[in-house]
Image: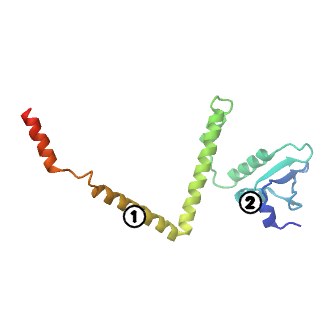
Amino acid sequence: MNSFVDIMNKNEPRIIKKYPNRRLYDTAISSYITLEDVRQLVKQHVIFHIQDAKTGEDITRNILLQIILEQEQAGEPIFSSEVLSQLICFYGDTLQSIVASYFERSLILFAKQQEDFHEKMYNPLSFMTEIAEQNIKLWKDLQEKFFNPTLLINPTHSKKSDNQEDKK
């Protein structure tokens, strides 16, 4: 039998089957799982597909929406009524695909920023090194600009230009 780590490292998605009795069966570990288990798979970034056992239809989105609904009801919701109302208004609108793309990109960016933040919080030495490197680069740029001979003003050149203009 494959270990959990072996299963996690596979590039192919895990297949979870939903049976008519509403139970979810994870074919990778040959065991029934709960919605909470599916939520943990999502949090661990495991790639999976959930299929209706009878029809073979991909019902992954439906199950993920069910998990979101349960999470929204269980604690402090992420989506206010106003946000949900606005989302509903976008369905069937000409901007629906643009809004979907916008949300997807925004969440990817937010997740990346959150990951960077956590990395900096848990590895402050790396963060301080990065800041120090940025400061050194800024200092070098400043020095190069300050001491650059092409940027220094030649006072005799300026006086000649002024005198020539006066004579005209």
Callout 1 secondary element: helix
Q: How is the image coloured?
A: rainbow
| In the image, residue 124 above or below residue 56 | below
Q: Amino acid at mark 2?
A: Gln
Farthest residue toward the bottom? 125
> Residue, x 26% and y 51% (percent of image)?
151
Farthest residue toward the right? 54
Q: Residue 167: where, in percent of width, then height? A: 7, 35
> Residue, x 56% and y 55% (percent of image)?
113
| In the image, residue 17 above or below residue 85 | below
Q: Residue 74: where, in percent of width, then height? A: 70, 55
Crowding at mark 2 (Cα within 10 Å: few <14, some 14-19, many 20+): few
Q: Amino acid at mark 1?
A: Ile
Q: Residue 68: where, in percent of width, then height? A: 71, 50
Q: Residue 18: where, in percent of width, then height? A: 87, 50
Residue position for label 2? 40
Q: Nearer the viewer, residue 109 or 142?
A: 142
Q: Earlier in the sequence, mark 1 or mark 2?
A: 2
Query: As drawn, is 81 to the left or to the right of 47?
Result: left
The answer, for residue 80, to whether it is visible in the render is: no
Crowding at mark 1 (Cα within 10 Å: few <14, some 14-19, many 20+): few
The quadrant in which residue 55 appears is top right
Residue position for label 1? 136
Callout 2 secondary element: helix
| In the image, residue 96 above or below residue 116 | above
The answer, for residue 58, to whether it is visible in the render is: yes
Farthest residue toward the left? 167
